[in-house]
Amino acid sequence: MALTVFVLVLFGWVMISSASAVVSYSNFAQNSNYFWLQGRSILVAILLWAVFQSTYYRRLKRFALPFFVICLGLLVAVFIPGLGASYGTSQSWISLPIIRSIQPAEFVKLGLIVYLAAWIEDNKDKLYDFQQGFVPFFLILSTVVGLLALQPDFGSVLVIVAIAFAMFFAAEGNILYLLAGGAVYAMGGGIVMTQKEYIKNRFLAFINPALDPEGVGYHIKQALIAVGSGGFWGLGFGRSRQKFEYLPEAQADSIFAVTAEELGFVRVVLLVLAFLFIGYKGFKIAEKAPDLFGRMLAVGITTWIVGQALLNIMVNLSLAPVTGITLPFISFGGSSLVTLTAGIGILLNISKYTETNAPSSSRRRDRRPRYSRNRRLHTSAIYR
């Protein structure tokens, strides 16, 4: 899996050099600005990957609450005048002098995973109880969802809800509670949609992509043109026509469409298979993890990567409304790349202690808490 992720990061860097050339020249009078910015982020990402891969994953538990609180603080900071920054319709960034900007939503995904993993392990006997199990879980999740909805960043909301629900389900929480919680979020989303005209327009454009092709349907229309133009083998690397400022966010949210246009259907299938392979290996690690904390971390991180990739691809194929979510490891964005690679480092560290990898002698010496093997996690059903 490590090699697959490394190849995806390098592949994404190469695709950014092509997809961002036009907008980079338009904004900075040079066509490689985004390429070098992403290169800087890759160096930081590799460093964090190495740190987390070599750090025993259970040590993260003692920092779960402080890290989660800091992430919530960053979500609040985006609303502070002079510190928060907006882009498009969302107030989702924090401007800093040296780093330029960070997107707290990406950090809160990792923070929530670590905190929920610790919380679930400490409350594993209460998960089937509504008041002591689901209500606290729902309040934790709703705090994050509420802050993201205020930005608004509904793409991140969908990913975070999917992560949290997958972790609760894999820990054998009551599925009926999850269905009820999902219904509450769906009703809340419907109310917000009636209040926000642009969100309603995105859903209308999803239902009918031909609606207002010069307005609300412009983004998805251009993405479909890019994907369709690529055919089976693509137009050739660097030969995208849609990146000439026809396709919004060609180097970020829409990089899948540019990739399909330049490299074609056959090569894009390989990209999709790479994410499916990461999902398979991630859930394998989750099933074989030595304790509940490790399993929840693995389930959360794997759901994060695969779920976000699936959502981005569906948006670019008009199978989901436009959400503004990045393609993991491929899209331009330092916050996304750094946090995702940190998550991969954690996942690889967990794999060192799985039942198949840990030597029998070390297992006898290691008295770390084990989760009962008699209670099979739902992860076995997920990856099979």
Image (tube, grey):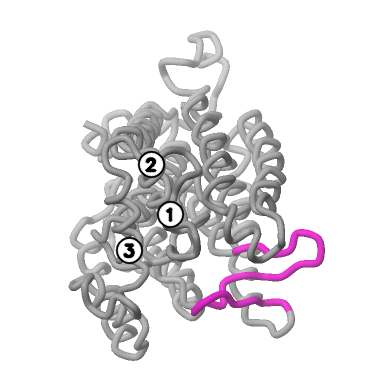
Coordinates of residue 291 in the picture (x, y in percent): 44, 33
**Magenta stretch, overall SS:** strand
Residue in the picture at 35% in, 63% down: 222
Residue 362 within the segment the image draws in magenta: no
Amino acid at the residue labelled 2: Leu
Judge from the rendering whether residue 233 lies leftward or rightward of residue 305; answer left or right.
left
Q: To which quarter of the image does residue 101 belong?
A: bottom right
Number of other residues with Cα within 10 Å of mark 1, as a class: few under 14, some 14 to 19, many 20 or more: some
Query: Which residue lies at the image location 56% right of the left edge and 39% below the top edge?
Result: 14
Pick whichever of labels 1 and 2 is earlier in the sequence: 2
Q: Which residue is mark 2?
A: 235
Q: Which mark is residue 134?
A: 3
> Which residue was labeled with disc 1?
241
Q: Name the kind of residue labelled 1 in the image.
A: Arg
Which stretch is magenta? 83-103
Screen quadrant of the C terminus: top left
- For marks 1 and 3 on the same chain, the one whose residue lies earlier in the sequence: 3
* Residue 100 part of the magenta segment: yes
